[in-house]
Amino acid sequence: MDAVRPGNHAFGGLRTTAVGSMSAPGWLISLRVRALQDPSVGPADLAEAARDATHLAVIDQEGAGLDEIGSGEIYVAGGFLGQYYDALGMPLQPVARRLGPFGYDQMPQRKLSAALSTEVTLGAVETWTVAKSFASRPVKATVAGPITLATPIEVTAGYPSRPDAVLALADLVNRELKALIRAGASHVQIDEPMIARDQDPLLAVEAAQRALAGIDVAKSVHICFGDNQGRPFAWRRYDPLVRELVKIPADEWVLEFANREMAEVELWPQWLDQAGRHLFLAAGVVDVKSSYIETPDDVAWRVQTLLRHVAAEDLSLTTDCGFSQTPRWQAVRKLQALVQGVRKVGAA
């Protein structure tokens, strides 16, 4: 199959790319917590801090040498998801278990009690635009996918069923992606880790198809197995999902491999056969769930393992997931190892 490269975006070729999020500096987190109770911290102070932190996220990624960076997803408090629920007007609900070790049963829940406004935005355009203003390299634009957005939501009114609410969220994501394109984004990505544990993959695929309808720039879908506080939440195998995933009209899959000791890389040719079309792969070769700092040789070995099954012109290299749960100093060193390891392979 010919490798069609959508738009002017260069997939593959052993490029290094971000998944999306970066570590928020400690001072930003501290200031946001302080602002909840201290009136001496004003909205302009928080906005300035958010811009400065986004600038640092760009510096960290470009300094490491990534070919394509992410927005950092720290411009708005809550990053990957928090900004969306506030924009959608869904109040926080108390969780039942509040003591003891962290578990996904402690994740905040939201209540949807009215139909979503078609005027609401998710904040992704502003986040991407701010990052782009500091960047000298291409910036990928990321948006949470509809299934992931719907996971913590209890639908009490506004829609006749939960699937109807999920499809409404898909329309919302689609509008956000189109707004990003109008703003100048040439590569967009929906993040759908919750597909890996969703009870209804058919709904997940229908929602992703709806979210990506009419999107005519390079488009990726990121699917991992969870990373809140370094903890996965699903059985960590893609193969049972592939039959449905191939129906999502993405050009590139962004998948987790390092944390799984490169499991399933040998299945890529089989997955392409199932897809019946060309796909690019952005493969995770750095484990964001581990405090172990990979060496360039570790990364090079993982890339060489991939190259036994994936053509170099179709392969980009990245981290398993974003760095929102990783200390900043570790994230920087892991990114440096990523770039240096890939360069070692490219120079061989």
Image (cartoon, rainbow, N blue to C red):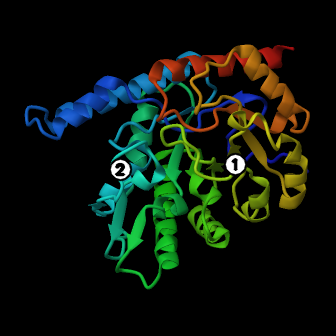
* Residue 192 visible in image: no
| Residue that sits furthest to the left in the current view | 39
- Residue 79 coordinates in the image, percent (x, y): 40, 42
Q: Amino acid at mark 2?
A: Gln
Q: Residue at x 81, y 39 (%)?
A: 314
- Residue 136 coordinates in the image, percent (x, y): 52, 24
Q: Quadrant of residue 54?
A: top left
The answer to whether residue 182 is left or right of residue 47 is: right
Q: Nearer the viewer, residue 119 or 100?
A: 100
- Mark 1 or mark 2, whichever is nearer to me: 1
Q: Residue at x 36, y 71 (%)?
A: 116
The answer to whether residue 94 is above or below residue 127 is below
Q: Which residue is mark 1?
A: 236
| Residue that sits furthest to the front in the current view | 100
Q: Nearer the viewer, residue 331 or 126?
A: 331
- Residue 149 coordinates in the image, percent (x, y): 47, 59
Q: Residue at x 36, y 49 (%)?
A: 82
Label 1 CA crowd tier, 10 Å (few <14, some 14–19, many 20+)? some
Q: Which mark is residue 343?
A: none
Q: Residue at x 50, y 51 (%)?
A: 143
The answer to whether residue 276 is above or below residue 72 is below
Q: Which residue is mark 2?
A: 83
Q: Amino acid at mark 1?
A: Arg
